[in-house]
Image: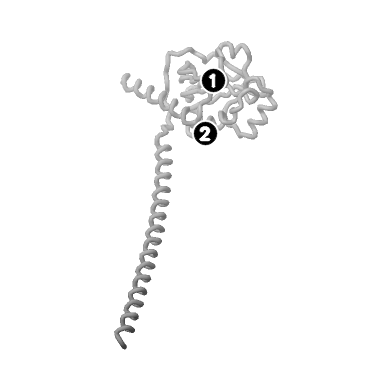
Amino acid sequence: MNIKNFLNLQTITEDIRAGMSHQLRSLGLVVCLVLSLFLLTSCGGGEKTSHTNTANKDVDHTIPQIRSTGKPLASLSAKVLGTDKELSFRPDSKQHLTIVTLWSPAWFDKSVAQIEALKQLRKEYPAPQLRIICLVYDTQQDKAQKIIKEQAINFEMGLGDSVLYNKLQVKAIPTYWFLDSDGNTLEVVEGLMDYDTLVKRIGLFIREAQDSDKKTD
């Protein structure tokens, strides 16, 4: 082999090596990219699950006896929706916290969201410790009954009158009355409350009751 041919062969060999090196580097980059995406996806999923579990652990499902010096509403009552039976606001010994709220599908366009938040709240705080009374306000009973059936509402539904609403001093729809273990007013909140806000409010009542018990002890 003469020198010219030898040099040509050497050049071709170097080109082949350079091409193979480039391909290997490209393949390495692809493998690294795939591994990175896999790790990111796995980590992201783990963080989401951890966050969900933490949120559930933050909810205290036990409601103690709660006492306040607010306006007494235990003597008030409505009618059980669709009947003539009395629906008293007075809690029994096992009902530690009562929420009374106005629900008006005819007037409030977010009435479904209101009910969904209360239904979710019921899952976190089952009866009897938490009692929920929903008063149908200025809505035809047949329309209300249809929605109740469709939404599978599982808390007390009542029907008030002008006398009751005057005593409650209704100013907004919806309104929420939080009552203690004796039927006294803890707080009145006007405007829609979502699930997270309701849970935070109940958590506040629970902590205040626990702190009060510690001071008594």
Seen at 34% across and 70% down, the residue is 18
Q: Quadrant of the image for the C terminus?
A: top left
Q: Is residue 204 above or below residue 31?
A: above
Q: Which mark is residue 139?
A: none
Q: Is residue 119 above or below residue 208?
A: below
Please name whichever residue, 121 or 182, is drawn nearer the observer in this view of the structure.
121
Badge 1, how many Cα within 10 Å: few under 14, some, many 20+?
A: some
Left or right: residue 160 versus residue 4 is: right
Q: Is residue 123 above or below residue 35?
A: above
Q: Is residue 10 above or below residue 180?
A: below
Q: Disc 2 marks which residue? A: 120
Q: Quadrant of the image for the N terminus?
A: bottom left
Q: Disc 1 marks which residue? A: 175
Circles 2 and 1: CB atoms closer than 8 Å: no
Type of amino acid under label 2: Gln
Type of amino acid under label 1: Thr
Seen at 57% across and 20% down, the residue is 173
Seen at 42% across and 16% down, the residue is 68
Left or right: residue 143 versus residue 112 is: right
Comparing marks 2 and 1, which lies closer to the viewer?
1
- Across and down, in percent, residue 74 comes to 52, 15
Q: Earlier in the sequence, mark 2 or mark 1?
A: 2
Please name whichever residue, 75 or 208, is drawn nearer the observer in this view of the structure.
208
Badge 2, how many Cα within 10 Å: few under 14, some, many 20+?
A: some
Q: Considering the numbered disc 2 on the image, is that residue within a helix, a strand or a loop? A: helix
- Across and down, in percent, residue 147 comes to 65, 31
